[in-house]
Image (cartoon, rainbow, N blue to C red):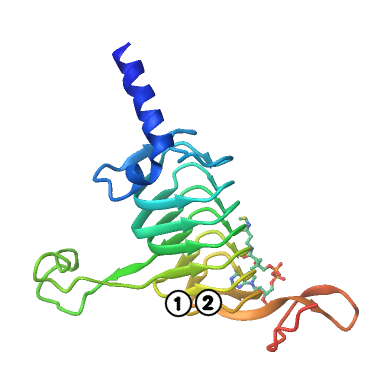
Amino acid sequence: MREFFRSLLRRVAVTCCPRLICRRSPVRWRLLRGWLVSGKRNVRIGAGCVVSGSVEFAEGVTLEDYVRLIGSPTIRLGRDVYINSFCMILGDIEVGDHAMISQFVNIWGRSHRFARKDEPIWVQHGPGGQGYKTAPIRIGPATWIGPHVTVLRGVTIGEGAVVGANAVVTKDVPPFAVAMGAPARVRGFRGVTSPDGELRYDSDAEGNRT
Ligand SMILES: CC(C)(COP(=O)(O)OP(=O)(O)OC[C@H]1O[C@@H](n2cnc3c(N)ncnc32)[C@H](O)[C@@H]1OP(=O)(O)O)[C@@H](O)C(=O)NCCC(=O)NCCS
């Protein structure tokens, strides 16, 4: 009975003041199916997802199982964003509406400093240490980030861009570009009509779109 009321109270609190609970909480909220839905409609959260820091969900966001989001300071997920299983996202991150992020994607807005060799890297961010390098990452609307992609700090991926499987994105990707490889290079642009009239993506450096 006590447990029931405790759980009811928590649900009410989550619904009424989700930002308060998500934001800067020392607790890592474990999101079990449909639990921390922050009052938005149609947000689907799979099993074993973990959210900490400040994370803002727009309507229609889907997190498949075992997604980890660490807002540092804030992750903003736009409308109908889809994030497949086992993705790790940390930092000052914005993901535009209808973006689709495949499984095992790593979007990490910071990197360890490691120039000093007199101590292990992991203690270098402690007091007096060398800290992290951080920069925001922006993933545009209607993008598709393929599986096992890593997006490094400071990168902007333009609207409608596609990033192929296993790419490491170190530099900005223009809108509607198709980028692949490590480091990711633009291989073409979507929506180009080839001479035989077929709609395809092509290596048109102008990025001509139909
Ligand atoms: C990026 C991608 C969408 C491109 O698809 P595509 O247009 O059908 O690509 P193609 O097979 O025609 O290959 C075109 C060229 O790109 C290369 N290429 C394709 N995918 C690549 C990748 N992920 N990394 C590096 N090069 C790649 C091909 O080798 C080929 O090179 P070539 O012109 O020198 O021969 C696709 O390769 C990809 O990564 N899809 C992910 C699929 C997936 O895992 N889906 C499940 C998760 S949602």
Q: Residue furthest right?
A: 196
Question: What percent of the width, then of the height, locates residue 60?
Answer: 59, 46
Q: Could you tell whether 137 is left or right of 70 in the image?
A: right
Secondary structure beneath dot 1 equals loop
State the image quarter where residue 133 is shown: bottom left
Query: Does residue 38 appear anywhere in the picture?
Result: yes
Which disc is residue 46 wearing?
A: none
Which disc is residue 170 wearing?
A: 1
State the separation of the CA atoms marked 2 and 1: 7 Å
Q: What residue appears at the point 72 percent right and 86 percent down from the top-left corner? A: 204
Secondary structure beneath dot 2 equals loop
Who is closer to the viewer here, 125 or 9?
Answer: 9
Question: What percent of the width, then of the height, locates residue 40?
Answer: 52, 42
Q: Could you tell whether 86 is left or right of 122 in the image?
A: right
Query: Does residue 31 appear anywhere in the picture?
Result: no
Question: What percent of the width, then of the height, locates residue 146?
Answer: 58, 62
State the image quarter where residue 6 is shown: top left
The tag earlier along the polypeptide, 2 or 1, is 1
State the image quarter where residue 108 is shown: bottom left
Q: What residue appears at the point 58 percent right and 73 percent down from the top-left corner? A: 158
Q: Are marks 2 and 1 in contact (CB under 8 Å)?
A: yes
Which disc is residue 184 wearing?
A: 2
The C terminus sits in image quarter: bottom right
Q: What residue appears at the point 59 percent right and 68 percent down from the top-left corner? A: 164
